[in-house]
Amino acid sequence: MTQDAPGGPPTRHEDEQDDHRVDDQNVQSAQAAQDEPGADGVRESATEESERAEARLEKAVRAAEQALIEFEIAVETFRVEVENFSRLHHQRLGPMYSRLDELDALIAEARAERSGDPEDLRKAREARAMVMPMPGVEELFHGWIDSEGLSAEAAAMLTDRPVQPPKRVRPTDEARRLYRELARKAHPDLAQEDKERARREEFITRVNAAYGRGDEALLRELTREWEAGPALEEERLGEAEELYARLEWLARRKELLTVVAQDLEESAIGAMLRMAPDDPDRLLDEIAEQLLAQVSEREAELAALVE
């Protein structure tokens, strides 16, 4: 067995090791070259990133649409309750308020007749004027016009159809469920084209009218009608500019609805409804009981004055 002299030429074994090292380096260089993106890779990566960004924007638009629809459902639900409460309040409690005004006038007139005092006579005239005021435009059309134009009662009278006033402030739970499902499916804000929006607006107007009357049967019929309607084309991924424009429109729409909701909440009827958010129909009964007690008190007072 021989040994190579130090500093001599490499042996065959060492040559093989060097060859292996060179091969390994070539393989690693090739792999690194493959991993390093070229121009095509950069373009592909940018395209994928753009598609992901647009997909995220599309998702944000759809989420904003659903949020707006839920907000509109809440506003419309409250609007129906405000209008129903106003109509029922007038129908059920109006005669009691009129009776109280009449009793106040009779009491004031009885006091004036007893005393003959000019101040009592003035108060008697004012009380009597409250009983028979000269009707203005608002009083003449009270209950005939609502946010949708002619009220259901007025339209029924003009077309010789039976009048169907609301029976309660808040429609039943089933009517509310049917209404919400229809609104979520058929809402005009989901339309991307004018023709489809017009179709949805006409349909949702009928849905709102049925819900305002608490008509469960009609709401079920409308549900079947919508389900049997024309199939909608699949929504295509929009261009980024269109999606941004859609988001801006949704934001403006929400601002308008916020104003409507605020006006409803700050109205006199809205304030009354907030006193009984769980059972507004019961509130009417409570007010009626209070008015009946006031009528009894006024009648007793009047009886004492005219004895």
Image: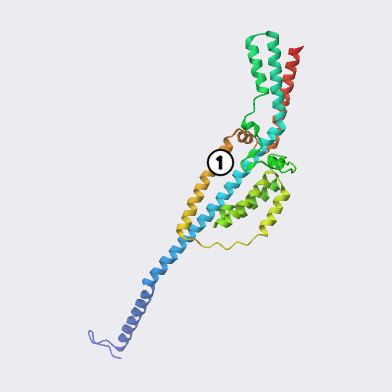
- With 129 as the anchor, is 256 left or right in this view? left
Q: Position of residue 61 (x, y in %)?
A: 51, 55
- With 27 as the anchor, is 220 left or right in this view? right
Q: How many marks?
A: 1
Q: Which residue is mark 1?
A: 260
Res. 37 in view:
no
Q: Position of residue 208 (x, y in %)?
A: 65, 47
Q: Position of residue 290 (x, y in %)?
A: 70, 27
Res. 257 in view:
yes
Farthest right residue in view: 307
At x 30% / y 86%, what residue is drawn?
15
Farthest left residue in view: 7
Query: What amino acid is at disc 1?
Result: Val
Say which of 240 and 137 sits in front. Answer: 137
Say which of 144 and 92 sits in front. Answer: 144
Tell me the quadrant of the picture where the C terminus can be found. Answer: top right
Q: Position of residue 135 (x, y in %)?
A: 64, 28
At x 66% / y 41%, what residue is drawn?
151
Tell me the quadrant of the picture where the N terminus can be found. Answer: bottom left
Q: How is the image coloured?
A: rainbow
At x 70% / y 50%, what residue is drawn?
219
